[in-house]
Structure formats: C-alpha cells, structure tokens
Image (tube, coloured by chain):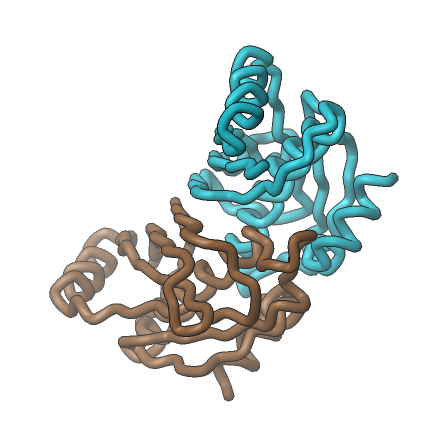
Chain colours: A brown, B cyan
Amino acid sequence: MAVERYLHQQIPLSAAMGVRVRMATPERVQLAAPLAPNVNHQETVFGGSAAALATLSAWTLLHVRMARAQLRARLVIQRSAMEYERPIPGDFDAVCRFSDELAWERFRATLARRGRARLTLRACLIHDARRVATFEGDFVALG
Amino acid sequence: MAVERYLHQQIPLSAAMGVRVRMATPERVQLAAPLAPNVNHQETVFGGSAAALATLSAWTLLHVRMARAQLRARLVIQRSAMEYERPIPGDFDAVCRFSDELAWERFRATLARRGRARLTLRACLIHDARRVATFEGDFVALG
C-alpha cells in the first residue's frame, strides 16, 4: 500500500516497529504493530512504542487529508498526551478517526489566511478488540 | 554499559532507535539517540521517537532507583504528556533528573503499605545544548 511504503521510507522507525497500514482514508486511519519489536521487559508493549504508534496514526490521517485537499504545508506536532489504561500483552492497533468537517474547514481557512493553523486529533489503541490507551495531539500546519 | 545492554535486550525498540546510555544514576539518567533511525519526512526527529526516548529516560531512572533500593515491583506508565517546543534537526538527548528524596520515601512507604504507589517524573529533550521538548509521566509501581 502506498501509504505504508511512504511511512516506512520517510519515517524508518515505523519499519523498525513493523507498522502496517490497515486503512488510511481522510476519515479513518488504522495502523497495526506486532508485539515482538515493540515489547518491553514485562512482555507487554513498551510505552514509547504505544505513544509512537498513536502519534503516527494521527499524523497519517492529517497527511492523507492534506494530500486530498492538495494543501501543501509542513506539519508538526506541538503537544500530546497519552493515557495508558491497561498493559498491552500482544499485537496492537492505533485508530484515529476524524469527521469534524466544520473544524477542518476552519483549519483550512486559517491556514490560507494566516499561513498557520492548529488541529487537535484523538486516537486510541486497541488490543484484542478492547481499548487499551488513548492519545490526544495538537498538530500545527505551517504553510 | 550494563544499563544500555539491558535496555537493548529487554526493549528492542531502544536498539532500533540507536539509544546510548550516557549516564544512569538514581539522580540523573541521560540517553542519546542519533537522528538517522529516528528521522521523519522533514529531516527532523519523528515525534514518536522523541516521546519514546523521553519515556525511556524516565523509566530507566525509576528502574535504577528501584534496583538500588532493592525494591521488586512491576513498573507501568499510566499517563504522559509531551510538549514539543521546536523541531529537532539532529542527534538528541533525553535527560531525566530526580532528587526529591521526600517524595521517594513517600513512594517507598506507600508501595510497602499498599503494594502500589505512583510517582511523577519529568524529562527534557536536548539538541545542540538547547531544550527542545519536555515530558511528564506518571509511573505506578505494583508490588
């Protein structure tokens, strides 16, 4: 898949983590990662891997959305927060959904007017059909 | 160094990230990571790598501190927050300091009494002698 190839080439840590792209649309990005390259000393997922996969899912959704809208801007993360709800003892997914078209239009308009706009995205991590962590990140686009 | 070998063996992502341990004492942990395995599409450090190195520095400090105190407990991260202050265009370090011995004694006493205790640690990321990001994480020890 083109998005997966792009991630592995441009962000080599995603290849080291074994990230696979299950879905990448402007409304939903779902990434998967195996336990083995992301494991910690307790045979669960290292918190840093969990944060990285969540960050990547949100970044990918914005990347896909900006590509569809033919927006050319540099995208940087400004702030993020993770809540680790339970240990993750196996393969895990990150799901980022976004369907607030009003917020998106505001983001586009602000970027066009000021050359800079911010958007907050949320993602969650899933293991065995259960939510195991949540992520929130503020991203800034610089035109 | 023993701590570096431990990290690479137990948390393989730290090896994939090229993490090196510059210092690991109960008062200060400093980890270094090169840009290449942690780069993003903009030739700066991927936010997920930044969060992972910061998380690892705080976790390592607690690990070293608990080993010195001969505390045997499972250590999990409960919550974390990152502020990305500026892009990181090269190799970077994570520094976690902790010298609040009063808080540490409270943590030890609570762990002994209740079999569970929480501690908040802060870390920062440094590039070119300048702070580029801050991290705060709540860790829970389960006896």
- Asked whether residue B36 appears in the rendered view, the answer is no
The number of numbered discs placed on residues in the rendered structure image is: 0
Q: Please report the residue visible at 77 percent of the width from the left and 44 percent of the height from the top.
A: B20
Which quadrant holds residue A113? Answer: bottom left
Where is residue A5, by image quadrant?
bottom right
**Front-most of B14 and B34?**
B14
Choose between A84 and A60: the one closer to the eye: A84
Q: Residue furthest left?
A: A102
Seen as rendered, the residue at the extreme bottom is A1
In the drawing, does residue B107 fall left or right of residue A37? left
State the image coordinates of residue A111 (x, y, percent, origin top left): 24, 58
**Relative to A117, is A41 on the left or the right?**
right
On screen, A142 above or below A81?
A: below
Please say whether residue A108 is visible from this viewpoint: yes
- Image quarter where the C terminus of chain A lies is bottom left
Identity of the residue furthest to the right in this view? B1
Depth check: give the residue in front, B48 or A132. A132
In-image side of A70 versus A104 (left or right): right
Most extreme residue toward the top, as rendered? B102
State the image coordinates of residue A101 (x, y, percent, origin top left). Answer: 15, 69
Q: Position of residue A96 (x, y in %)?
A: 34, 68
**Residue at coordinates 50% horizontally, 74% vertically from top-left?**
A32
**Residue beneath the point at 60% across and 21% down:** B98
Q: Residue at x 65, y 48 (%)?
A: B90
Classify B121 as above or below A94.
above
Where in the figure is residue B21, as x and y percent of width and height?
77, 39
Vertically, is A41 above or below B86? below
